[in-house]
Amino acid sequence: QVQLVESGGGLVQPGGSLRLSCAASGSISSGAVMSWYRQAPGQKRELVASISDVGSTNYADSVKGRFTISKGNAKNIFYLQMNGLKPEDTALYYCNFYWFRFTPHDYWGEGTQVTVSA
């Protein structure tokens, strides 16, 4: 059974920084795509950033140049460095591991709250 735990959220002023972490327990494929999503109240969940098994990254236009997704030394940990935070970045941030081997494997954390406010 795979479980994901996010950490690092909090309250920060506009222009500030936060670093989110996602740690997975259980058996994780080395081919997993790791992603961060976010969902603001009344909004759909949206992809923020993803990183593939070979390190290719993808970012939402709204966070390009401000956020950086990276992997940890262990294959079951990854991060989201968020700089230049804006009030519109306020949301519940979820991490996700996804891979396909015979069947899809799609795992989510419970989310960590990021609030950007003066």
Image: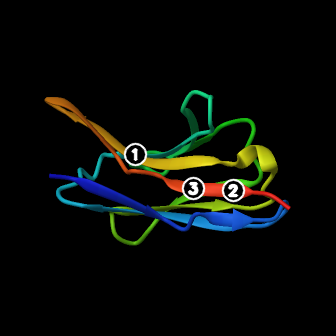
Tag 3 residue:
113
Taking the view exactly as shown, the residue that stands out farthest to the bottom is 73
* SS class, disc 1: strand
Task: Give the CA separation, mark 2 to mark 3.
Answer: 6 Å
Dot 3 falls on a residue whose secondary structure is strand
Query: In the image, what residue occupies the spot 48% across and 51% down?
Result: 55
Q: What residue is at 38 percent from the left and 48 percent from the top?
A: 53
Give how far across and how far down residue 32 sits, in percent: 32, 46
Q: x, y (%) of residue 4? A: 32, 56
Describe residue 4's horizontal placement relative to residue 6 as left or right. left
Give the residue at mark 2. 115
Q: Quadrant of the C terminus?
A: bottom right
The type of residue carrying mark 2 is Thr
Q: Residue 96's mark?
A: 1
Q: Residue at x 37, y 51 (%)?
A: 109
Mark pair 2, 1: CA separation: 20 Å
Q: Nearer the viewer, residue 70 or 108?
A: 108
Instruction: Count residues near mark 1 (Cα–Cα under 10 Å), then give few for <14, some for 14-19, many for 20+.
Output: many
Residue for point 30% across, 46% down: 31
